[in-house]
Amino acid sequence: MQRRKRRLATIATTMVAMLAASACAASEREEPGPEGEASGGTLVFGAAGDPKVLDPTFASDGETFRVLRQIYEGLLTSEEGSAELAPALAADFPEISEDGLTYTFPLREGVTFHDGTEFNAEAVCFNFDRWYNFTGTAQNPGVTPYWQDVFGGFADTPDTPNIFESCSVEDDLTAVIQLTTVTSRFPAALALPSFSMSSPTALQEYDADNVTGEGDAPTYPEYATEHPTGTGPFMFDSWDRANGQITITRFDDYWGEPAGLDEIVFRTIPDGNTRKQELEAGSIDGYDLVAPGDIEDLESQGFNVLTRDAFNILYLGINQGQFEGAEAAGINPALADIRVRQAIAHAIDRESIVTSQLPDGAEVATQFMPDTVDGWSDAVTEYPYDPDLARQLLEEAGATGTTLKFYYPTDVSRPYMPDPASIFQVMSQNLQDVGFVIEPTALTWNPDYLEATANGLADIHLLGWTGDYNDAYNFIGTFFDAKAGGVAKLDFGGYDNQELFDAFRVADSEPDPANRVALYEDLSELIVDFLPAVPISHSPPALVIAENVEGLVPSPLTSEDFSTVTLTD
Amino acid sequence: MLRFIARRLLQLIPILFGLSVLLFVWLRNLPGGPARALLGERATAEDVEAINEALGLNDSIFVQYGRFVGRVFQLNFGTSIQTGRPVTTEFLQRFPGTIELTAFAILFAIVIGIPLGYLAARRHGGVLDSASVIASLLGVTVPVFFLAYLLRFAFSVELNVFPGSGRQDVRIDATHPTGFFVLDGLLTREFDAALDAFLHLVLPGIALGTIPLAIIVRITRASVLDVINEDYVRTAESKGLAASTIRRRHILRNAMLPVATTIGLQTGLLLSGAVLTETVFAFGGVGSFLADSIFARDYAVLQGFILILAVVYVLVNLLVDISYGLIDPRVRVR
């Protein structure tokens, strides 16, 4: 007994000593720095997923872009809080030659990279030449998706169409980009974080081009994981991958207004409920992808829910079954009949979906891009909710009672589709009301669902898109233009609509901006008449911050700039 | 003893071979693949094809398996498609977290489970007994994510005594020589970091420990009930031995064999990745990464992690077998 008492006493003493020691250590740390500088503090932001890689060239997803947006800048950017294009490292918009092929960019003066390297026309061309001259694994579409999406091929792949011709240095602060063909994607795409400027010194020092792959996956060089070096208001500090934490710190020699915060920590918390509770507990200062059902609760607790302007589209894809094997896959041939597609459009009560299933601020979509994109037309055919007309169209087509395999994803919340299952419920009921028979298939989002829809297995399916930058082609071209083999995606049944495809070619290669907008408006009308899918809605995604976080402006592109953020007591 | 250990280790070879074949076939029969998972909505058929070609996924499954085995012999499990880093690096950085969490959960289960099971058996049919049976049933049936939500709401959001996710407060700038955060804090004398890491273990540890706790309570209770009715206990009582001696030497020691087996099996299970707990607590261990890897179709990580964890599982159970001898000399292995 005596011995046990002694042991308990020892344990208690040790614990008290540990607590005391920790209190001392903590109090030592909390003292201000020796210079006594005003402290901007640390912001902890809860992200839903890990960034993939920190070299912007190799990045393509939202979580990665969020971090890169703070470290890097490109020649152009999107205006704060909107999707409008604005100059960033370019001092102004480029001067464009009459043929639309030569872009002369005046550059901002007095900009340095985080490693002290000067930013100038040579650095610009170094970056463009680097992208164009990638070889080996770096040419994989999973590694350089946006370069290939926007510019096409590489120097050593002459058979792949490519719009980049050259970059030349006119003088220290003037860079000239020469294109091979005109496209609506340039220069708008330069606002994407993927086309940010990296320090040429750091790129060379850390072997940035050396992407290797041995069987399983691409392996990125040191630059992309340990030494990302841009010109942005924050510098990379550390990345703890096992614990999902990226720390960035203020860059004091930033050319613009210096950041208000000392440090930002992006913490990955995959579970939405955990993010909410961690905000409530004060462990994080904000998070993204707020579930629509949580908004009211969060606001009532005093948190600021910031709603972004909707820059996305949810659509119901229709499979016209025009590809080889469509019959074997059991695709309903009736969907090739425009009257059946019109019946679907008139059967769906989009107004009710928007009010009952989507967050405040969501809107019914009349076409496949939000009205902030140049190319949105106010003259598209509308398909109001009209069950009687739907029944009549179906009867005329002799398709009453036809069966539709309706695919929808589970376990996922996308900015344009917070709760797919409930949207499916409403649509399914609407379609059954007018005489369709629905055969539902629910699949896990990635990769099961995406794979099934991309292989044309669904008669109808729910999918959508968040715009990358302000360009009509980025919306409608992604979905409806011809893909490999000169036909449409299998999602939509691989239709071969040459009139539509030709219209895309003409609009994309029109050098005059005003004419181009008119051409895209015509295209919007053409697509809505052809009805390869039914546009459903645009939803505003939300993020939330604690009360003491100020100055964060929500961006429709979900690409917020944290340099304007400050913390108040 | 050495022969016993050697024999058990040799048994690993067919186990690992069989497991690797099963894993390989299973993974490649999952719908979708890494390319689709990598590109998401943005994937086009050509992109998927190009990535599959580059990753060697268009080769026959035999060729792929051959390549895999060739690399495993060099202790190279390949590269994660999610992070682009070697699978072994990913494992070594995450496994210490899982070990710490498992240790906390199992200790929690033992420290509460064995006394509770013992008391329930001694008060057989009483209130405490019924209560512990009901509580242990609840422990097994409550889903982890629900328990996580409740624990975090009570102790993190409302009372603010325990942190609700992660392994360390991001504002603590600690050094981590070993990757075991509590140990690191003690070694580097950053005691605040050690305490913080320990506090971070509490809620996920309890959430993870409830199932082993419930099982240990029930096994201890059943086992003690068996033993207290044995003749030698009655003999000990009638010859006037102190109650504490009877409890320790005659009852507990004899009742512990099945409990030790349970603890061993449960430890092995928890070590092989507390997938749900780690995910809902954003705890950087092997479990949460395994879960991510299934969605990302990260073949290399799934193959590598599961094989390494199989080895760990076998080793833990070997230790349990050896520990039998310590508890009960009659089953000491030769």
Image: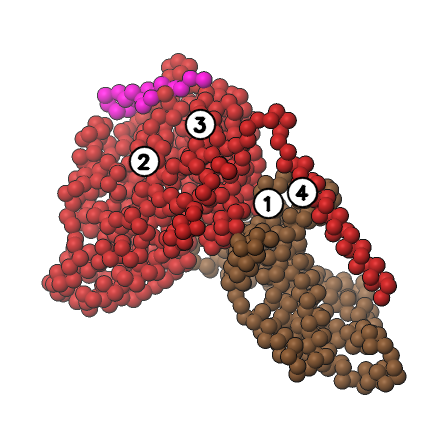
Chain colours: A red, B brown
Q: Residue furthest top?
A: A171
> What's the CA distance linking mark 4 and mark 3?
34 Å
Q: Amino acid at mark 4?
A: His
Q: Amino acid at mark 3?
A: Met
Mark 4 or mark 1, which has the lower sequence index? 1
Q: In the shown orientation, is residue B231 left or right of residue A68?
A: right
User: Which sits in the foreground, A347 or B18?
Assistant: A347
Q: Residue furthest front?
A: A569
Q: Which residue lies under the disc numbered 3?
A: A197
> What's the CA distance linking mark 1 and mark 2?
36 Å
Residues beneath discs 4 and 3 located on the same chain? no
Secondary structure of the residue carrying tag 4 is loop
Locate residue B37, reporting x and y percent. 44, 50
Secondary structure of the residue carrying tag 2 is loop
Locate residue A440, reporting x and y percent. 32, 65
As drawn, B175 above or below A489 = above
Secondary structure of the residue carrying tag 3 is loop
